[in-house]
Image (cartoon, rainbow, N blue to C red):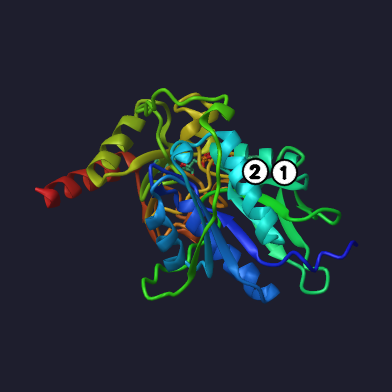
């Protein structure tokens, strides 16, 4: 292997929308710190945008030892060209051995552009990240492969930095600690608006889309619901709790609900504060996507359903009786 001793440290890209960070950035900082500790280096954060100094401060509270802040008016909205140039400037100057991004639409776009230009290797959509210790210091980036039937661990031996995108919800953020100390490094970055082909004219939020990855409460239903109609009952419980509706693949494949609601290996990986698994048996392909939720409540009429092995609370019974009763109770407590 070439001598990569000039490359040290783990850099994590902090994705945000209008200054509000996506959870995946903090989760990756937590995992970045675990990798950095093994390699005995620092974990660093990359914050790009306009008037986003508070995000750099916040990155320190989530574990960053150093934060590289690229702040310019041309960086107000995400656009591939200026963001990839700004990222590459930081990567060239700092020379991290590992760079991590959330496997979001933006993270995938940005990481792909950077990896192509540097050039270096990029493992997309990882679900496990580890490192070999010194001297190889290789990032072991694992992801499902061959139609999700196997896990592949991918190494990048010939290029630096080693890059990966990782799914939201897979890794755990460190607890926010406002007393944590770190350094913020301002990076001078100049770009002319005329150099950037893409112009953002307006930003229109798609209200119809749900955001499972960022949701704090998920009420998920499976084949036990028996059809699309009972999902309305789940929506009522989700509305009463201020959550969103999730689903198993069986429910999605049956056409009862859209794929954007699917939790699991081929859906979203989620880590909400509260996860209801209703009429879901608990197949491993489902549980890998939700087992890290803070609190799991399962409702199933089969007392031997595997979902009860991952649930903190289990209710054995008919969901058609139990769900409306819980909704009623939540509503009455809210007054
Ligand atoms: P079932 O296994 O049929 O379970 C239904 C449950 O409802 C049963 O436990 C039953 O006791 C209960 N029930 C029925 N009626 C009632 C009632 N009235 N009251 C209470 N309980 C009731 N699955 C996913 O979810 N997400 C994925 O991302 C995913 N990816 C996959 C990828 C691959 C490569 C493969 C091979 C499979 C994948 N699967 C995935 C499918 C997975 O293996 C299961 O088939 C699926 O999760 C089962 O969904 P389910 O639990 O809703 O249905």
For mark 2, give the secondary structure.
helix
Tell whether 47 sits left or right of 299: right
Residue 259 visible in the current orientation: yes
Label 1 and label 2: CA atoms lie apart by 6 Å
Query: Circle 1: is it few (<14), some (14-19), or many (20+) Cα within 10 Å?
Result: many
- The answer to which of 15 and 252 lies nearer the viewer is 15
Residue positioned most to the left: 335
The quadrant in which the N terminus is found is bottom right
- The answer to which of 300 and 18 lies nearer the viewer is 18
Tell whether 193 sits left or right of 51: right
- The answer to which of 217 and 200 lies nearer the viewer is 200
Tell whether 244 sits left or right of 23: left
- Residue 25, position in %: x, y? 50, 54
Q: Is mark 1 within 8 Å of ligand 1?
A: no
- Residue 263, position in %: x, y? 51, 42
Q: Which mark is residue 115?
A: 1
Q: Is the Cβ of the residue at disc 1 closer than 8 Å to that at disc 2?
A: yes
For mark 1, give the secondary structure.
helix
Query: Circle 2: is it few (<14), some (14-19), or many (20+) Cα within 10 Å?
Result: many
Residue 300 visible in the current orientation: no
Residue positioned most to the right: 1
- The answer to which of 28 and 321 lies nearer the viewer is 28
Q: Is residue 310 above or below residue 175?
A: above
Q: Which residue is mark 2?
A: 111
Q: Is mark 2 within 8 Å of ligand 1?
A: no
Tell whether 42 sits left or right of 152: left
- Residue 214, position in %: x, y? 41, 46
Q: Is residue 24 above or below residue 206?
A: below
Residue at image coords 61%, 71%: 42
Q: Which mark is residue 41?
A: none
């Amino acid at each position: 292997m070439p001598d990569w001793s000039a490359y040290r440290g783990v850099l994590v890209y902090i994705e945000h929308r209008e200054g509000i960070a996506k959870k995946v950035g903090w989760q990756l900082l937590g995992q970045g710190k675990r990798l950095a500790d093994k390699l005995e280096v620092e974990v660093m954060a990359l914050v790009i945008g306009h008037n986003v100094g508070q995000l750099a401060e916040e990155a320190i509270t989530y574990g960053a030892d150093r934060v590289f802040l690229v702040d310019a008016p041309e960086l107000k909205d995400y656009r591939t060209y200026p963001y990839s140039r700004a990222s590459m400037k930081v990567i060239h100057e700092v020379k991290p051995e590992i760079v991590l991004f959330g496997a979001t639409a933006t993270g995938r776009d940005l990481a792909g552009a950077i990896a192509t230009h540097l050039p270096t290797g990029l493992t997309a959509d990882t679900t496990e990240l580890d490192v070999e210790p010194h001297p190889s210091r290789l990032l072991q980036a694992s992801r499902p492969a061959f139609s999700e039937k196997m896990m592949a661990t991918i190494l990048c031996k010939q290029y630096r930095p080693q890059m990966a995108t990782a799914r939201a919800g897979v890794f755990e953020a460190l607890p926010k600690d406002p007393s944590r100390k770190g350094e913020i490094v301002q990076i001078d970055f100049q770009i002319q608006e005329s150099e950037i082909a893409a112009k953002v004219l307006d930003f229109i939020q798609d209200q119809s889309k749900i955001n499972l990855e960022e949701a704090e409460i998920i009420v998920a239903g499976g084949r036990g619901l028996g059809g699309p109609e009972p999902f309305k009952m789940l929506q009522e419980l989700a509305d009463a709790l201020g959550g969103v509706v999730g689903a198993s693949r069986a429910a999605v494949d049956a056409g009862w609900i859209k794929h954007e609601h699917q939790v699991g290996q081929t859906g979203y990986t989620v880590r909400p504060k509260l996860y209801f698994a209703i009429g879901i048996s608990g197949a491993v392909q489902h549980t890998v996507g939700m087992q890290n939720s803070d609190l799991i409540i399962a409702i199933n009429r089969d007392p031997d359903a595997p979902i009860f092995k991952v649930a903190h609370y289990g209710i054995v019974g008919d969901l058609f009786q139990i769900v409306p009763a819980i909704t009623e109770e939540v509503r009455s407590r809210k007054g």
